[in-house]
Amino acid sequence: MLNQNYEPLNICRWQRAVTLVFLGKAILVESDSKTLRSPTITMPMPSVVRLVRYIKRPLPKIKLSRQSLMERDNYTCQYCGKQSKHLTVDHIVPRERGGRHRWSNLVACCVDCNVRKGNRTAREAGMKLLKDPQRPRFIPYLSFATMRRALTNEVWRDYLEPFAPHLAPD
């Protein structure tokens, strides 16, 4: 669902999209190959709808969570590059040494690298990060994980990429 200015607001079920279009609260922008039929009307299955009126919402802040951290790092160990759904969260500067629980001090890490690094800094352990950790920039109103999954839909990608080109799949 897009705001009046084509900014993505959320992902809704097709029933909600049909209701909004039927009530005149949204305009059909993209449709699926399927057709919805009732005794009185026939309409294409909506894939993307745009609201008729602009919805003003405050910009949300992305929350630091295990899931959003894994999404930011693409489920890849930031030391060895191994991809897995079974990663740990590593503090680059250990908490016992004053390391904070912040985006810039946390990375996804495989168990082997986490054990090897132990309670040392990455430099002390002779390990190098693949990239510097940063707070992710993301599209307003969609969670980071939802945004990454939504970009896999070819039709939606055209509407999402302008707001988060850094998340686009390679």
Image (spheres, rainbow, N blue to C red):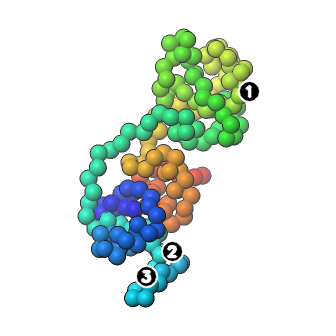
> Which quarter of the rendering shows the N terminus?
bottom left
Among the 4 quarters of the image, the one containing residue 41: bottom left
In this picture, is 28 found above or below 85? Answer: below
Please provide percent x and percent y for residue 164: 45, 50
Please state if 59 lies on the left or on the right of 161 as rendered. left
Residue neighbourhood size for the residue with mark 2, other residues' Cα within 10 Å, grouped as few (<14), some (14–19), many (≥20): few
Q: Is residue 127 visible?
A: yes
Q: CA distance from mark 1 to mark 3?
A: 54 Å
Amino acid at dot 3: Met
Residue 43: which numbered mark, if any? 3
**Lower sequence index among marks 1 and 3:** 3
Residue neighbourhood size for the residue with mark 1, other residues' Cα within 10 Å, grouped as few (<14), some (14–19), many (≥20): few
**Lower sequence index among marks 1 and 2:** 2
Disc 1 target residue? 112
Q: CA distance from mark 3 to mark 2?
A: 10 Å
Please provide percent x and percent y for residue 28: 38, 73
Please provide percent x and percent y for residue 102: 47, 26
Q: Closer to us: mark 3 or mark 2?
A: 3
Q: Dot 1: what SS?
A: helix
Q: CA distance from mark 1 to mark 2?
A: 45 Å
Looking at this view, name the residue that lies furthest to the front. Answer: 39
Amino acid at dot 1: Asp
